[in-house]
Image (tube, rainbow, N blue to C red):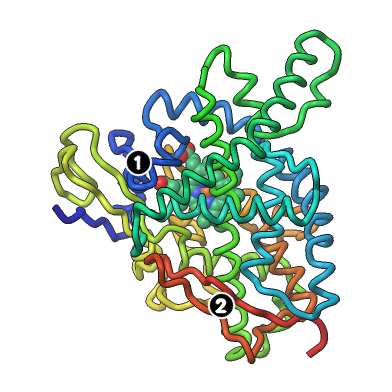
Amino acid sequence: MPPIVVSEYKHANETLRLTDLRQALYDEGAILMEKVLVNLHGEEHRARRGIEIKVFRRDFFEWYEKQVFPTTLRETLAPYLVAGKTDLVDFGFRVMMNLTADFSGVDRPRRTPEETATLLRILRTFGKAATLGQALGDKAAIRAEIQQAMDEFDADFFRPSMARRQALLDQLARGEITEDALPRDVLVELLRAQAETPISHDVLMKEIGFFLLAGAFTSIHTLTHAMHDIFSWSASHPEDAPRYAQDPVFLQKAIHESMRLHPSSPTAGRRPTCPMHLPSGQDVTPEDLISVDLMAANRDTSIFGSDAADYNPHRPAPRGASAYGLSFGIGMHSCLGLTLAAGSVPRSGADAREHHLGTVSLIARALMQHGARPDPANPGVVDRSTIRNNWSTYPILLGQA
Ligand code: HEM
């Protein structure tokens, strides 16, 4: 049976808020995703989200964006500045992976390039679970590859990370250390809550793998789309080109515009838990699959204007919608990392020093300040193995032209 498609912004927005619809986008990726947060429903979802959200408080974003992120970004960028070039996708993976590993709770004790490369390889394979429903290749072979990556992740990264955190929590319980000695991450919170909300080893491991994915993959692909939009707009509007490097609030608005046009997942999938009536008027039952077309909703001309399908960094703030549309979801599964990735929506006259820009804008800003531009000899390549149209490579040059 073909899915029921919801594509008007208003209906999409209301549909995603309905609590009688459960997640259905990741059913094919069950091997990794079955019991992870984004797939849970009802009380089980509320309890897990309530534990994990403790990591993502406002002071966390403040500390992370102002204290942690600039150093990681500088260190990761340094060798590429010397080389005068990088690949946006690979660079994005390197910056985001270490950061998402930190807030997920995955230690990298050896801190060697080989260790980073191993985790990157595992993460890229996990990424195939989230897009398995949209994959065009041999799905059984992809599942076998994901299982192998999970076994490796469990043995080499997850078990040691969990053992270290459990030992710290035991020390805390005996009064030998204070709260400040604990890492601030999702795994610590889940282990701390084990007595009240027990989760099996297998599910804990997958939950942390999912967090790595949710934090890194989305931001990386968003960054590449945003940089491509910046390069294209600068070519046709040279008067705006310097503003991307010089005006952080303009840059952030431009990133939000790109996020609207390129939602990480072009659709959200839901299934009714009971017979019900959708805001778009249809009556549906648990047999129906509902596809909320985020890409179409984010281009709804009644909300974003007659040129809604085009990129325009000067677009006026839409009424009754966020500048990035529904790209971070809404309702019970709304993105926990929204402020981390996108910052907060700037008010007019916002001071960039006080304001949260978000990691995607911070990376784009650093690249633009170092003269980032497409490498004319090596054009970027779009990944055609899923329907998401993400870039698989995007070579850029850095430094003086
Ligand atoms: C540009 C970056 C990002 C985009 C576009 C994005 C997008 C989304 C979307 C659309 C959803 C909702 C899925 C649905 O309704 O089915 C979601 C959920 C989620 N996101 Fe993000 N995300 C981004 C970054 C992050 C980051 C940095 C984190 C790390 C904390 C994160 C963690 C999550 C989690 C945990 C959920 C599931 C929430 C739940 O089910 O309760 N995301 N994200």
Label drawn at residue 23: 1
Q: Is residue 309 left or right of residue 99?
A: left
Label drawn at residue 229: 2
* Earlier-in-chain disc, 1 versus 2: 1
Quarter of the rendering containing residue 286: top left
Residue type, label 1: Gln
Question: In this view of the protein, can residue 329 be seen by the observer?
Answer: no
Question: Between residues 157 and 198, which one lies in front from this camera angle?
Answer: 157
Q: Height in image: 182 above or below 172?
A: below
Q: Height in image: 54 above or below 167?
A: below
Q: Position of residue 362 (x, y in %)?
A: 72, 62
**Circle 2 residues within 10 Å: few <14, some 14–19, many ≥20:** many
Residue at image coords 23%, 57%: 5
Question: Between residues 350 and 8, which one lies in front from this camera angle?
Answer: 8
Residue type, label 2: Asp
Instruction: Respond yes or no on whether mark 1 lies under 8 Å from ligand 1.
Output: yes
**Circle 1 residues within 10 Å: few <14, some 14–19, many ≥20:** some
Question: Between residues 175 and 228, which one lies in front from this camera angle?
Answer: 175
Residue at image coords 75%, 46%: 64
Q: Secondary structure at mark 1?
A: strand
Q: Residue furthest top?
A: 174
Instruction: Respond yes or no on whether mark 2 lies under 8 Å from ligand 1.
Output: no
Q: Height in image: 63 above or below 304?
A: above
Q: Position of residue 294 (x, y in %)?
A: 37, 59
Q: Position of residue 37 (x, y in %)?
A: 47, 35
Say which quadrant the C terminus sits in.
bottom right
Q: Height in image: 201 above or below 319?
A: above
